[in-house]
Structures are given as C-alpha cells and as structure tokens.
Image (cartoon, rainbow, N blue to C red):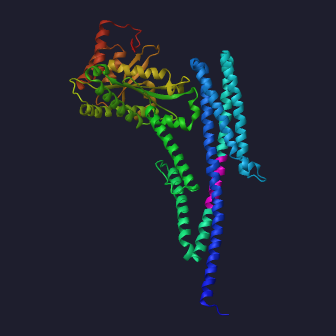
Amino acid sequence: MQLNIAQKIFGIAAVVLILMAAVAAFSIHMAAEISKELEAVVGKYLPLSDTIGDINVSILEKGMLLQRLFALPEETPRAIARIETLDDGVNDTFEKAHRLFTAEERSPHPPESILLLSRSLSSLEREYRRFEKQGFALIALREAGDATAFEALLPELNHQQDNIAAEISKLRRHVETVAERSVQRADREERILVWANSVLTALAAILGLGFAAATTFMLVTNVRNLVRGAEAVEGGDLDTEVPVMTRDEVGRLTGSFNKMVDGLRMKERISDTFGKYMDPRIVAQLLENPEITEGGGEQQEMTVMFVDLKGFTSISEKLPPDDLVRLINEFFTMMTEAISSHKGVVDKFMGDAVMAFWGPPFTSPGEHAALACRAALAAVENLNRFRVDVQETLATRPEGLHIDLRIGISAGDMIVGTIGSKASKSFTVMGDPVNLGSRLEGANKTYGTRILLSERVRYLAGQAIEVRELDLIRVKGKTEPTRIFERLAAERVADRFPAGLTAYRNQDWETAEREFASCRAMDPTDSASGVYLERIAYLKANPPGSDWDGVWDFTTK
C-alpha cells in the first residue's frame, strides 16, 4: 500500500518522536546516575573529608593544650574550658559524620563503600574515645597537682594521638578511594551519555539537536575544565581557578575544587613565609620528615662558619637607624647568597653576624669543608659588590665608613638536630667545633686577616683550596693547641712566610725576623707578618725558654 505524503510525514514524525523519547529516557537515566555519583561526592565524601580535617585539627589542639597544663599553670582554667569546648565540637562532628550514611546503612542492601567508610569512621571514633578518656585523666591529675603521674601518662596520650593519626590517614584514604571511584563512574557514564546522545540526536537533529547539544556542551565543558584544572595543580600551578558555569552538582564540585586549591595555595604561602625565617631546605626537611621535629639529634662530622661585619659598633655610630637597618639587611642578603649558592644552610643571624653550616643531609659527607671554603671566598667577592651598593643606597654619606668582614670556619663532630623548648624549637648544630669556629672569626682581629680555618677544615678540603699555615694557638677555654690556616684567594708568589714560621718555632729569631720582613717588603698589606715581627721583638727581649712549644695563647674570646 502506497503511503501518502501525510502518512510519510506522520511516520517520520513518529520515528523522530520515538527517537526523541528514547533520547529523553536514556538521558534522564544516565543523568540520574551521574547526579547520584556526584551527589555522593559533594554531599557525602567531601563533607566527610572536611569533617576528618576538623577532627584532626581539634585533636591536635587538644593535645597541645593538655601538654601545656603543667608548663603554663596560669592558663589551666582557660585551657580546660577550651578542651571541653573541643570535646563537645568533636562529638557533634562525629554525630554529623555518622548521619551522612544513616539512610544507606538502613537500606536492605547498603553499598560496600558506605559500610567501609562507616566502619572506618567508627574505628576512628573508638580511638578518639580512648584519647578523650586519657585527656580526662590528665586533667584530673592536673587538678590534683600530681606532676609525676601527669608526666608518666603524657607519653600514652602522644601514643594515642599517633593511633588517631593512623586511623585518620586510613579513613582519608578510604574517602579518597571511594570518591575517586564515584568520579570515575560519573566520568564513564558521562562519556556514554555523550556518545549515545550524539548518535541518537543525529537522527533526531531537527527537533532535539539544539537542546541536547547545549546540555552536552555545558556538561562536557565543566568536566574538561575540572580535568585541566586538576592537571595544572598536579603540575604545580596553584594559581589555577576553574570557572563555575552552572549551579548543579558539577558546579558545586567545581566550587569545592577551587576551595581545595585555595587551601593548597595557603599552605604554599605558609611554607614560603617560614622559608624567610629559616633556611628553606630546613623547612622542606621538616615537611618531608616530620619526625625530625622531635627533640634530640645525632652526632656527625660537619663544617660551621661564622661571618661577622667588622667594626659594626663604629658603623652604627655613624649611620641613622634607617640606613643602619638597610645596611645590615643588605649585608645579610649578600652573605646568605654566598652561603646558599654553595649548599650551605643559614642557621641564624646574631646581631651583625651570620652562622651557617654544611653537612648531611644537605650535602654529601665528603664535600662540606670545601664548599664552606668556597663560600667564604664568595662572601668576600660579594663584599666588594656590597660596598658599592651601600654607597648608592644609603640616604647619608658618612665620612670614613669602613666596611669589611671576618670569617671563621671549623669542622668536626657536632650534634645536629632539633633543639629548644616545647614552645620554641630550632634545627641547629652544637659542639666544640662550633665554639672554635666562633673563636677563629674573632682571631682575625689579631692577624689582620679575613678568613681563618681550623686544621680539620684544611685536611678535609685537601688540595681543592689555597691556604697558608698561620699559627699554632690555644683559644680561650681550651687546653689543646689548634693549628690554624688563612684562606687565600690565590697562590702567593715567592712567599717566605713558611720559612719564617719554621724559624720562629725553632726560636731562630734572626732568621724569622728576616723572613717575615721579606714578606712585608713583598706585600705591605701582609698584617700577619707584621704580627710576627712584633712577637719576635717581644720574645727576643723576653726569651720563652727551651721548653717553649711555639703555641700562642689567646686570653680573650
């Protein structure tokens, strides 16, 4: 039977309507599945993740307050009140977290992922109850004034905090895994939806293409923006912000993503800020290895250097406060640049002095002494640039402003680690070589030198550096003599200093005097030779005796 035009049109229209109905039904089904997955992510997993963070922060704060009960007794009432507030808040938070899964748990066939999260949350709550019980016990001991029992119970509290941290990490991993699976399912279903819509709407393009294309485009754009944003963050770009184009679940997920990136950006700013108050590599070590924040340290061979701005008292008298601060800040900048460019770690600024150290884990065990010696020469080179900059930047031009530096470098076994009180700590080095480095910096005044090294530094650096032996001294506070060396920028031509030093130690005053005078004639700036000429004149008039060992005693620091 022949179909007339009206029947054909009606048949085509019927097919189109059927296709449109199929498209609509399929789209509704898939959109519902996607919405379900995204709703789970936005309505359950992300809030649970925030809840975990709130619990973790509250527990950390409570732990700190409990530990400070005896350290700061005057804050006890306020601390206990805050602890009670934190307990109430954590209890409410746990209750809110459990309510997220109440409906699914009561269903005949609850999802395995929900049961997993619920069990993990319950396990975390059990550990917290133990922690809460210990906290009440500590408060009771504090109120009873039993310091011994309090200190004995405190490590158990720390151990329980570690257990809670482990449970939090486990729960966080579960949340991340479940959320990632939901997003993957949503993404897979979204791709199926896009493909099916493309095929079906191609057949029903006349009536449904516009709406379907617009809906699909918006959905795909949001997902792709999220993917690009995630890839950018993974690549280290924390300035990424994904535009929120809709108010649906994808839009809410995009907003949550932007909020997460804001948090990461804030942490990065915090890390950068702390990097201005201590060496960035120490900050990195603290973030990567939190265990080093615990008190204590380990003994290992390292090199330490002290850099001091010569004549700071005289300089400070000639400059107004603003110029003085500008000068010292620029000096620290130049010295830090020389130290950091040679793998050194700036330990602290002390008035007008800088203390730095080299050694594992910041350098290899065999290179720290040579690196410190090269950093010392770089500091002298930076000093020349610093002098020029100071003259250009100071608001005043004081007459007779003489800027120079002194450097002492020592090496040996030191204690390196986290040292300090419960309220304030620092990652630093301690030991006899540190004290010797400080003494060597001051000894430069006697010899008119800039850089003095200990014998151990000379040995460890080997032939990589140019030095000359300067003296055998006994610094204040030590009984053993120390052989010291002057760090030279280049080899000294026809230097008679070693011959003079040998004759001096043999009490051959005439030969020593002749050699040191020769050194002064070749280099009038050789202050060390002048020092020996003065000593020889004194020793000739006051012979030291046959048992003299050639050691010069320093009676001041």
Q: Which image quadrant is residue 356 in?
A: top left
Which residue: 61% across, 33% down? 58
Which residue: 53% across, 57% down? 246
Q: Main secondary structure of the magenta part?
A: helix
Which residue: 34% across, 7% down? 543
Q: From the viewer's perspective, is 467 left or right of 200?
A: left
Residue 329 place in picture, x, y as percent: 34, 30
Asked whether 318 or 12 is in front, the reply is 12
Q: From the viewer's perspective, is 164 left or right of 490?
A: right
Seen in the picture, residue 545 relative to 217 is either above or below; the reply is above
Residue 36 place in picture, x, y as percent: 65, 56
**Image quarter hosting the C terminus:** top left
Residue 441 place in picture, x, y as percent: 38, 22
Q: Residue extending furthest bottom? A: 1
Residue 534 place in picture, x, y as percent: 28, 13
User: Is 186 colored magenta in this rendering?
Assistant: yes
Seen in the picture, residue 240 relative to 152 is either above or below; the reply is below
Q: From the viewer's perspective, is 17 left or right of 492?
A: right
Q: Which image quadrant is residue 300 in?
A: top right
Numbered marks: total:
0
User: Is 249 colored magenta in this rendering?
Assistant: no
Q: Where does the magenta region start and end?
A: 174-188
